[in-house]
Each structure stands twice: as C-alpha cells, then as structure tokens.
Image: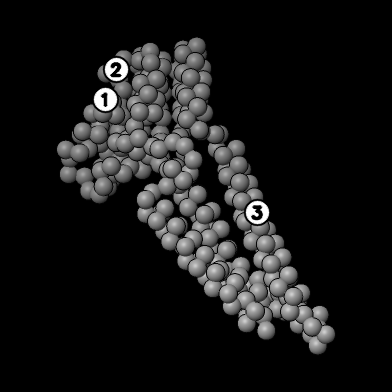
Amino acid sequence: MSELNRLISLAPEGLPSTSVNVSTERGGTRYGAINLTELVIHLQDSNASGNLNTWDNLRLEAEDPAASRRICIAIDKQRVTVEVSGDDATWVHGQAARVEVFLKAAGGLEEEKAWSNGRVALASQAITLIGVTVTAWATVVGFKAAGVHSSEQSAAEVVWRMALGVLIGAGPVAAVSFSFLFFMHRANRAQLLPTAEVAHGPWWSRASSADKIALLALTVAAGSFLVALATLGKELLK
C-alpha cells in the first residue's frame, strides 16, 4: 500500500492533480478516483463482488490539458507497464527515469531479465535438491548394502538393494525438499495489495501461516518415516 501510494504520487508530478485518474477493473466494471486512498474507499462502498482486499489490476493515467505531458502506469500480478509521452522531452525522460529507479528499488526487473533470472533460479534450485537427495541416500544405502554383503551375494544384488533403498528412502526427503521449493516460490510470488503492506524479509517470514503449518507437518511426517526406515533398514535390505 505505501509503495503504491508513493508511486502514484511520484509518477504524475508536474501534472495538474485534477488530471490524475487511478482505477481498477472488477467484474467488467471500472472503478476510478483521484488517488489510491479514494479508490479503496470507493470500491469498498460499492457493490463489487469478491474479496475487496484482493486486487489483480491497477491503473494510473494523467495528462495535462495541452496534451504535452502524459503518463500511464498499468499494474497487474505479472508486470508493471509504464508509458511516458509528450512534447516536453525533459519531463518525459526525467519522469521515466524516476519511475524506473523507484520500481528497481522495489525489486523490479526488466521483463526479459526477470523471466531469464526466474527460470535459471528455479532450475538451479531443483537440480540442487535432486542432487542432494540422490547423493545423500545413495551414500547411506551404499554403506548399508556393503555392511550386509556376503560372499553369496552378487554385485547385481547389492546394486538392486542400493536402488531399492534409494527409492524407499529418497521419497520423503524429495517430498520435503520439493515442498520447500514450492512454498519458497509461493512466498516469493508477486502480490498486489493496495489495502495492506507486503511483508519483506526472508521467504519464511513472508509465507502464510497455513503454508508454514503444512510444511512443518510434512517435515514431521517425513522425519517419522525416516526414523521407522532406519529402525527397519536391515529387514528392508534382506
């Protein structure tokens, strides 16, 4: 809310306040006001459906009477699009630069760079989790297999037992690992909250209470399974 208010105050500087229109569309109806505070009040006093604290779009438009300066900012949960135009080149370039600096300070990236960084981060995290899971359990089961190996067991039997142990043991570890990855990206997802503040800090502090409970419950369940597996490990490998 505070960041949106600052952006809406910054963007139309140099334009008449009467030319500013802040709006949002809900259910095919567009609601508008002169600033964000008035828009929130207008929306809450209207007959709009759904959760009025949850928005998926916001738009700012401002233009001077002579049409020499104009700015439009469209915001949704995927991107922020900024258009600055007019005959006053100094104002146009100056406002475009100021808005860009503001958005980057709020964590924004140019669309192409954001897409690339997001895919690379997701892929690297997934590969790391898979590698850690498989390596850890292959090592553990390898030691177990070596411990129960006898002269009557072939190398193929030992390998089969190692693979079986990895499949059985890696399941809960992989479930917890990928759950962490899922909830991490869920906490990092874009939010448009004109009526509240967006939490800052590590992803865990920004995750919802329901997500934290679900992740802790899954971790406890996986831990219980691993304890049982460790207890019955010799029987499983026979």
Q: Residues within 10 Å of mark 2 (few under 14, many from 20)?
A: some
**Residue drawn at point x = 27 percent, y = 38 percent:** 30
The reply to whether residue 189 is in sight is no
Left or right of 159, for residue 218: left
Residue in the foreground of this view, choosing between 37 and 92: 37
**Residue drawn at point x = 21 percent, y = 33 percent:** 41
Q: Residues within 10 Å of mark 3 (few under 14, many from 20)?
A: few
* Position above or below: 80 against 229: above
Q: Position of residue 177 (x, y in %)?
A: 56, 58
The reply to whether residue 173 is in sight is yes
Name which residue type carries label 2: Ser
Label 1: which secondary element: loop
Residue in the foreground of this view, choosing between 216 and 77: 216
Label 2: which secondary element: helix
**Residue drawn at point x = 31 percent, y = 15 percent:** 16
Instruction: Name which of mark 1 and mark 3 comes first in the sequence.
Output: 1
Instruction: Name which of mark 1 and mark 2 comes first in the sequence.
Output: 2
Give the residue number, with chain letter if any, for mark 1. Answer: 34
Name which residue type carries label 3: Thr
Which quarter of the figure is the C terminus placed in? bottom right
Q: Residues within 10 Å of mark 1 (few under 14, many from 20)?
A: some
Residue in the foreground of this view, choosing between 124 and 95: 124
> Residue 128 got which mark?
3
> Residue 17 got which mark?
2
Instruction: Give the CA separation, mark 3 to mark 2.
Output: 52 Å
Asked whether the residues under the numbered discs 1 and 2 touch, taking CB atoms below 8 Å apart as contact, a structural biologist would say: yes
